[in-house]
Amino acid sequence: MASGKQIMVIAMDDSPHSMYALEWTLDHFYTPFGSLRPFHLVVVHARPVPISFLQLATTGGMVVGGGDIGCGRLTDGVNALGFEVNTLNVEVMEGDPRNVLCEAVDKHRASVLVIGSHGYGLVKRAVLGSVSDYCAHHAHCSVMIVKKPKT
């Protein structure tokens, strides 16, 4: 563990749901520009692996919709929210987000995994699968699923 603190893994992608989960976590676990920092934060962004060579060639070597979240951009965003987080690591890992997040929890020996919920209904969840549901059943730590309130 880094500096004796417990580790919290936060799942991020480019969706507003994961950004809300990050904001919610900072609001509830960190004091703005204060000294209370109960966890060492590790932000994990899982990029899907291209399914085929054709997909890789047609996207110019980039995975469509899999934009990287840079450490500087994320740290600047956290500071813009009014929080100063010095213990923030960002990792970009390729693979199925369900497996990547569970592997990150094991790798860092995390105490908590924070993940946003896209709020899919029963049919979409059955077809697309639910990353948060999978992690809740397979991660070797407590899993906090943050839902964005409906406006």
Image (cartoon, rainbow, N blue to C red):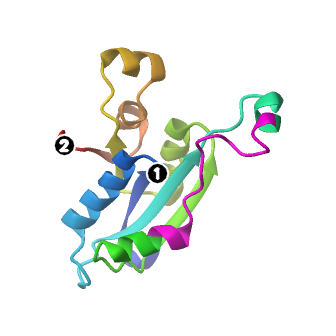
**Of the pair 48 and 39, the residue shown nearer to us:** 48
Residue 86 image offset from top left, x and y in percent? 41, 80
**Is any part of residue 1 visible from this angle?**
no
Q: Which residue is drawn at 19% across and 63% down?
A: 28
Distance, label 1 to label 2, CA atoms, is 26 Å
* Bounds of the magenta segment: 58-74
Q: Where on the picture, by quarter, is residue 116?
A: top left
**Of the pair 56 and 116, the residue shown nearer to us:** 56
Q: Is residue 15 magenta?
A: no
Against 132, residue 42 (above or below) is: below
**Of the pair 89 and 6, the residue shown nearer to us:** 89
Which label belongs to residue 35? none
Q: Residue at x 72, y 29 (%)?
A: 51
- What is the chief secondary structure element of the magenta stretch? loop
Q: Nearer the viewer, mark 1 or mark 2?
A: 2
Q: Where on the picture, by quarter, is residue 32?
A: bottom left
Tag 2: amino acid = Pro
Q: Residue at x 37, y 54 (%)?
A: 19
Which label belongs to residue 105? 1
